[in-house]
Amino acid sequence: MNELLVVSRDARGVATLTLNRPAALNALSPELSAALGRAVGTLAGDGELRAVVLTGAGEAFCAGGDVKSMGAATTGDRPERIARSRGFAGLLAALRALSVPVLARVNGPVYGGGLGLVSVADIAIAAESAAFGFSEPRIGIAPATISPYVLERVGTAAARRLFLSAQRFDASEGLRLGLYHRVVPTAALDGALEEELAAVLKCSPSALAACKRLIAEVPRMTPAEAIEHTARVLADLWETDDAREGIASFAEKRAPRWAR
């Protein structure tokens, strides 16, 4: 039996999570979602991790929730339905909270909940041949669990049309709306991913972790709180080995040797 989620890692500390249900367009069955949650939980405690890539096997990235398994949700009891939704919400939150950059390699079609995975990624690159859509209303539900991340990504005005029409759209439209950071020919997808990874890996791991915390925390602060908080963050970073190494390497015109 094939693994539902293939986890690989290279010598640079880049972990790749590949959704592996290609015959089902990598739809998120409860089992696949659980496997992804376990993998993310393991990676969260990995001190040698530098980046995470999320992608799909075969021709699709992720077709969203597995409709066949959703039948059980319509007949089960309410606590079970809430627990299932909370589980996926927890997975999205855990992906967002990873201290390293998360990159979505969108190799093909992505719908519904799959767009939630894209929206929590720090960097999203899509193949220009891919197609997208928030298809939930077509089966009588709504993109509820993923909505906080999608709204943050594209804004409420764009989300109104995307949610309320459930229309499919192409990668160029997704790029215009801000759902993706880059759209490239399918044959160039891996090259574009490597360009992004190369840029990430040149940066200090502790500085990138601080950047992710700032992105998460500063928007919720008042101006006065942000001034005090960011001053302390920068003071703390100046005291790190990475800061000393980064400044020394710049002065010596060499590549920095980060602590991990």
Image (cartoon, rainbow, N blue to C red):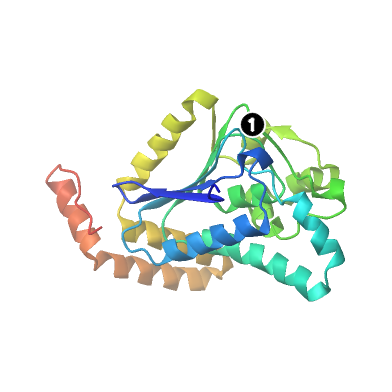
- SS category of the residue bearing label 1: loop
Query: Is residue 191 shown above or below 87?
Result: above
The residue drawn where x is 50% and y is 24% is: 187
Q: Residue at x 41, y 39 (%)?
A: 196
Q: Which residue is mark 1?
A: 130
- Residue at the extreme bottom: 79
Seen from this angle, which residue lies furthest left? 252
Considering every residue shown, the one lying at the far front of the view is: 1
Identify which residue is drawn at 42% across, 30% down.
191
- Residue 97 can be seen in this image: no
* Circle 1 Cα neighbour tier, 10 Å, few/some/many (<14 / 14–19 / ≥20): many
**Residue 27 left/right relative to 183:** right
Kindly identify the amino acid type of the residue bearing the numbered disc 1: Ala
x, y percentage for residue 236? 31, 70
* Residue 207: image location, x then y, percent: 34, 58
Whether residue 47 is visible here, answered yes or no, is yes
Quadrant where the image shows the C terminus: bottom left
Q: Position of residue 92 (x, y in %)?
A: 60, 60
